[in-house]
Image: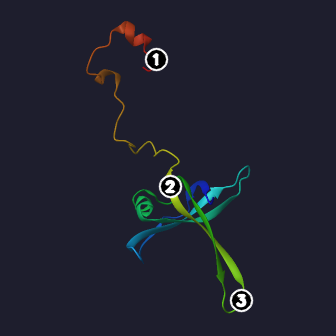
Amino acid sequence: MNMIVLMGRLARSPDIRQISTQKGETKVARFPLVVKRNRTNKAFAVMITAYGSNADFVEKYLEQGTKITLSGELVISQIKDEQTGTASYFTEVIVDNMEFAEAKTKKEESDGFKPVGKRQIPFNIPEELEKEMPFR
Protein backbone atom coordinates (compact mmCIF):
# COMPACT_ATOMS: atom_id res chain seq x y z
CA MET A 1 0.00 0.00 0.00
CA ASN A 2 1.33 3.43 -0.96
CA MET A 3 -0.30 6.08 1.24
CA ILE A 4 1.09 9.14 2.96
CA VAL A 5 -0.60 11.61 5.32
CA LEU A 6 0.85 15.11 5.74
CA MET A 7 -0.09 18.29 7.60
CA GLY A 8 1.51 21.59 6.72
CA ARG A 9 1.18 25.05 5.23
CA LEU A 10 1.31 26.12 1.60
CA ALA A 11 4.68 27.72 0.90
CA ARG A 12 3.19 29.73 -1.98
CA SER A 13 -0.09 30.11 -3.80
CA PRO A 14 -0.98 27.14 -6.02
CA ASP A 15 -0.14 27.00 -9.72
CA ILE A 16 -3.32 26.02 -11.62
CA ARG A 17 -3.21 24.68 -15.19
CA GLN A 18 -5.36 22.82 -17.69
CA ILE A 19 -3.84 19.73 -19.30
CA SER A 20 -4.99 17.40 -22.06
CA THR A 21 -5.42 13.72 -21.22
CA GLN A 22 -6.93 10.73 -23.01
CA LYS A 23 -10.23 11.53 -21.28
CA GLY A 24 -10.12 15.21 -22.29
CA GLU A 25 -9.14 18.41 -20.50
CA THR A 26 -8.51 18.29 -16.76
CA LYS A 27 -7.37 20.82 -14.18
CA VAL A 28 -4.06 20.36 -12.31
CA ALA A 29 -2.96 22.26 -9.20
CA ARG A 30 0.62 22.16 -7.88
CA PHE A 31 2.07 23.72 -4.76
CA PRO A 32 4.83 23.12 -2.21
CA LEU A 33 3.67 22.09 1.27
CA VAL A 34 5.98 22.88 4.20
CA VAL A 35 5.82 20.11 6.80
CA LYS A 36 7.39 20.28 10.26
CA ARG A 37 9.46 17.28 11.31
CA ASN A 38 8.50 15.44 14.49
CA ARG A 39 10.24 16.52 17.70
CA THR A 40 12.45 19.13 15.98
CA ASN A 41 12.17 22.68 14.72
CA LYS A 42 13.23 21.65 11.23
CA ALA A 43 10.85 21.51 8.28
CA PHE A 44 10.89 20.23 4.73
CA ALA A 45 8.89 20.99 1.60
CA VAL A 46 7.05 18.44 -0.50
CA MET A 47 5.59 19.17 -3.92
CA ILE A 48 1.85 18.40 -3.97
CA THR A 49 -0.15 17.70 -7.13
CA ALA A 50 -3.96 17.64 -7.28
CA TYR A 51 -6.11 16.68 -10.27
CA GLY A 52 -9.77 17.21 -11.21
CA SER A 53 -12.12 18.02 -8.33
CA ASN A 54 -9.20 18.20 -5.89
CA ALA A 55 -7.62 20.85 -8.14
CA ASP A 56 -10.95 22.73 -8.15
CA PHE A 57 -10.91 22.71 -4.32
CA VAL A 58 -7.32 23.99 -4.29
CA GLU A 59 -8.11 26.78 -6.75
CA LYS A 60 -11.21 27.89 -4.85
CA TYR A 61 -10.03 27.73 -1.23
CA LEU A 62 -6.25 27.49 -0.80
CA GLU A 63 -3.64 30.22 -0.80
CA GLN A 64 -0.16 30.78 0.59
CA GLY A 65 -0.06 30.10 4.35
CA THR A 66 -3.20 27.95 4.51
CA LYS A 67 -2.79 24.97 6.84
CA ILE A 68 -4.13 21.69 5.45
CA THR A 69 -4.06 17.97 6.09
CA LEU A 70 -3.91 15.68 3.08
CA SER A 71 -3.53 12.06 2.17
CA GLY A 72 -2.28 10.72 -1.10
CA GLU A 73 0.15 8.58 -3.01
CA LEU A 74 3.90 9.14 -2.72
CA VAL A 75 5.56 9.20 -6.15
CA ILE A 76 9.33 9.23 -6.63
CA SER A 77 10.43 9.81 -10.23
CA GLN A 78 13.90 9.42 -11.64
CA ILE A 79 15.14 12.14 -13.98
CA LYS A 80 18.23 11.38 -16.04
CA ASP A 81 20.49 14.11 -17.35
CA GLU A 82 21.27 13.06 -20.92
CA GLN A 83 24.47 15.10 -21.13
CA THR A 84 26.14 13.87 -17.94
CA GLY A 85 24.29 10.58 -17.50
CA THR A 86 23.60 11.31 -13.83
CA ALA A 87 20.24 10.56 -12.28
CA SER A 88 18.34 12.71 -9.85
CA TYR A 89 15.08 12.02 -8.06
CA PHE A 90 11.92 14.10 -7.75
CA THR A 91 9.43 13.40 -4.96
CA GLU A 92 5.79 14.49 -5.02
CA VAL A 93 2.47 13.52 -3.48
CA ILE A 94 -0.62 12.96 -5.65
CA VAL A 95 -3.61 14.05 -3.53
CA ASP A 96 -6.50 11.68 -2.81
CA ASN A 97 -8.13 13.68 -0.01
CA MET A 98 -7.52 17.01 1.72
CA GLU A 99 -9.13 19.20 4.35
CA PHE A 100 -8.48 22.35 6.33
CA ALA A 101 -6.36 21.91 9.47
CA GLU A 102 -7.35 25.15 11.20
CA ALA A 103 -10.36 27.43 11.48
CA LYS A 104 -10.63 30.69 9.61
CA THR A 105 -9.59 33.80 11.48
CA LYS A 106 -12.16 35.39 13.77
CA LYS A 107 -12.68 38.34 11.46
CA GLU A 108 -14.11 36.00 8.82
CA GLU A 109 -17.42 34.29 9.47
CA SER A 110 -16.83 30.59 8.86
CA ASP A 111 -20.46 29.48 8.50
CA GLY A 112 -22.39 32.73 8.17
CA PHE A 113 -23.95 32.50 11.65
CA LYS A 114 -23.43 35.04 14.39
CA PRO A 115 -23.97 34.26 18.07
CA VAL A 116 -27.28 35.41 19.47
CA GLY A 117 -27.06 37.87 22.32
CA LYS A 118 -29.01 37.28 25.52
CA ARG A 119 -31.59 39.98 24.72
CA GLN A 120 -32.18 38.74 21.15
CA ILE A 121 -33.81 35.44 22.16
CA PRO A 122 -37.40 35.53 20.81
CA PHE A 123 -38.97 34.07 23.99
CA ASN A 124 -38.65 34.62 27.73
CA ILE A 125 -36.81 32.11 29.90
CA PRO A 126 -37.89 32.07 33.55
CA GLU A 127 -35.19 33.38 35.89
CA GLU A 128 -34.91 30.08 37.86
CA LEU A 129 -34.30 28.08 34.65
CA GLU A 130 -31.81 30.65 33.38
CA LYS A 131 -29.53 29.93 36.37
CA GLU A 132 -29.70 26.14 35.81
CA MET A 133 -28.75 26.21 32.13
CA PRO A 134 -25.10 25.07 31.88
CA PHE A 135 -24.58 26.43 28.39
CA ARG A 136 -25.63 30.02 29.11
Residues 131 and 29: in front is 29
Image-quadrant location for residue 70: bottom right
- For the residues bearing labels 3 and 1, Cβ distance under 8 angstroms: no
The CA span between labels 3 and 1 is 71 Å
Is 38 on the left-hand or right-hand side of 100? right
The CA span between labels 2 and 1 is 38 Å
Residue kind at label 1, given as amino acid type:
Pro
Q: Earlier in the sequence, mark 3 or mark 1?
A: 3
User: Relative to 40, does residue 85 appear above or below in the rendering?
Assistant: below
Q: Nearer the viewer, mark 2 or mark 1?
A: 2
Name the residue tied to disc 1. Answer: 134
The quarter in which the C terminus is drawn is top left
The quarter in which the N terminus is drawn is bottom right
Q: Earlier in the sequence, mark 2 or mark 1?
A: 2
Name the residue tied to disc 2. Answer: 97
> In the rendering, at what x and y percent does residue 29 appear?
47, 67
Q: Secondary structure at mark 1?
A: loop
Tell me the residue at 51%/58% (across/down).
Answer: 96
The CA span between labels 2 and 3 is 37 Å
Q: Secondary structure at mark 3?
A: loop
Residue kind at label 3, given as amino acid type:
Gly
Q: Secondary structure at mark 2?
A: strand
Outermost residue toward the front in this view: 1
Tell me the residue at 41%/61% (across/down).
Answer: 53
Per the rendering, the mark at residue 85 is 3
User: Relative to 126, does residue 121 appear above or below in the rendering?
Assistant: below
Outermost residue toward the top in this view: 128
Per the rendering, the mark at residue 17 is none
